[in-house]
Image (cartoon, grey):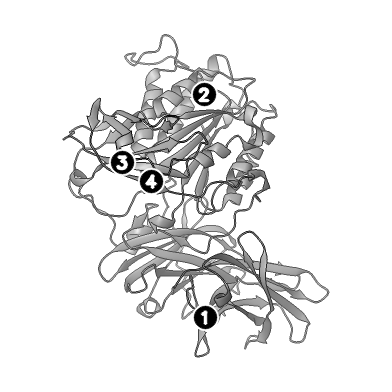
Amino acid sequence: MFQCVLRRTAAVAATLTFSAGLMLVSGATFQQSERPLVVDFYALGADGIALPDLKTAEVAIRVNGRARTIQSLRLVKQSELPSADPLAVQSAALTQPFGTNNSAELGRSIVLVVEDESIRVGSGVEKPLRAAVSTFLGALSPRDRVSLWTLPHGGMKVNLTANHDRVSQAMLDIGGAGDRITGPMAGCRTRESLEALDHLLSTLQGGEGPAIVVYLTGGMMGPSDDASAGRIAPGMCELRVDKFQRVGQMAAAARAHFFVVKIDDLSGPTDGLENLEGVTGGTRIALSRAGNTGLVPVAKSTASYYSAVVDDGGLDVEGGIGLDVKVSRPNVTVRSRPLIYLRKPKGVTAQPTTPDEMLKTAAMFTDLQLRVTGYSSAHGDGRIRLIAAAEPVDPTVKLASLSAALYDDKGTMVVKTVASEPDLAAMPVLSAMAVNSGQFRLRVAAVDTNGRAGAADTDVLAEVVDAGALKLSSLVLGVKRDGKFTPRLQFSNEPLAVALMDFFGGKQGAGIGAILEVLNMAGETLVTNRLSIEATQDPQRFTATGSVPLGALPPGDFIARITIGVDGGPYGRVVRAFRKVAN
């Protein structure tokens, strides 16, 4: 199959480094002096869920001490609410049909920060911490992206990803790493953590929605009694108040909403938690009192937020200035930062305009909206052929150029390919790269014939699945026209879809069996069909195909699953999510 749908294979090695930060910026070129003053905040009812019907007349916003006219107010839904029973949710998030830069389909950006040196080695809090994080991840939507960091010295462990299992797996390697929990050295540890947090926030550049930072710590020291911002040089472990204030400024610049989580109530200082909570406008959580579900309220309360456009009143300042948001409706909890960050107008901000330039940054570009996904198959030299598939969300758009690249966990570009003119004429555009097996982030960047630029990312697993003597490629869904198979990233009014996969290592007449199942997102089987096995010109390669009755399915997301193996031997399984939309 892969040999049929591809016209070429390109695998250009590269050493460019993908920014290790969590850049969430929009790709639109804008005149900064024309940017509206936008305030984002949460308005929660007694159930901890965003109010669905807040009115402009119920909201009062003051910026720099002055009441501002609210020009517009809208509720922005970023994600679904958690299951009523988050403990019943399986830890592995279901696969998304494709990656996209369509802002309407982007979920939350959540940064988990574990201050591991505030956790004493052998304290025993690692297990409940991991359980709480696992339950929290299970309460998220599959489209929510999560990153994991350890501070002060560990850095980023997992970049923003919708693969929540990667985060759970990385948590297994995180435990108590410090002995500076209390005493004189605790001030040094807190100061170093604040400086590292400052750096982390500098990589968050405020995108389509606010970022959510969940700061998990065993305790933080507060500013020293004799510390003052006017001191020329701090002592060895002196902790000045300006270290906290700087974090507050950076949180405002990053549009970050904080949750300050105390892991263990039995040990560790708490004065610093109050300071961090104050400068960020954060919410405090005592994890040990809430058990495994202690972080679920974070998922619950941040599913939707309010975005208000207010009169800037001719503000001509740079930096963080005072912000106060109040709601007149009774029994409403408002969560907002105490600062809003302003930048002086600096004219038109230049943005990358070619696919190769967009590949060199982690920034989000949304003028041209794309869908992207990846398929894996054996390459023949021990590596994996990873095929990037990309298409514009608007089917009438014509692409002028497109490039795709794979990045490893360290953010390094390991391979890149550029689409040729014949490639661009087909939809989706297919680009092939050869790479060693592993987990990667696929980034596709494109420019259309009107000059609009877009870049989208998705996680891909470059692998072939073992099924005894068989090696299984990815499952690909598409349609057949005039005997030719074409992959599809999304379906609508097609009566049937074709499920197709390659496998290697079989023998003609060896009793190979394959079953295709279609499941809903709750895991319930809706359709079961047998697949036909066909030989190819390569005596070691076979193709399995089956039909998915799209006409019988309502609009929504589904899972296609193939189970295949040789009779009497082990079986293997490959899955792919797909989406059907209304006509």
Mark 4, residue position? 75
**Residue plotted at (40% across, 12% down):** 227
**Residue plotted at (46% across, 78% down):** 8
Mark 3, residue position? 308
Badge 4: how crowded within 10 Å, few (<14), some, or many (20+)?
some
Label 2 SS: helix
Query: In what quadrant of the picture does the N terminus appear?
Result: bottom right
Is residue 34 visible in the rendered image? The answer is yes
First in sequence: mark 2 vs mark 3: 2
Q: Amino acid at mark 2?
A: Arg
First in sequence: mark 2 vs mark 4: 4
Query: In what quadrant of the picture does the C terminus appear?
Result: bottom left
Separation (CA) of disc 3 from disc 1:
44 Å
| Closer to us: 308 or 380 | 308
Badge 2: how crowded within 10 Å, few (<14), some, or many (20+)?
many
Separation (CA) of disc 4 from disc 1:
38 Å
Of the two numbered discs 2 and 1 in the rendering, the one whose residue sits closer to the viewer? 1
The reply, left or right, for residue 580 in relation to residue 425 is right
- For residue 155, above or below residue 245: below
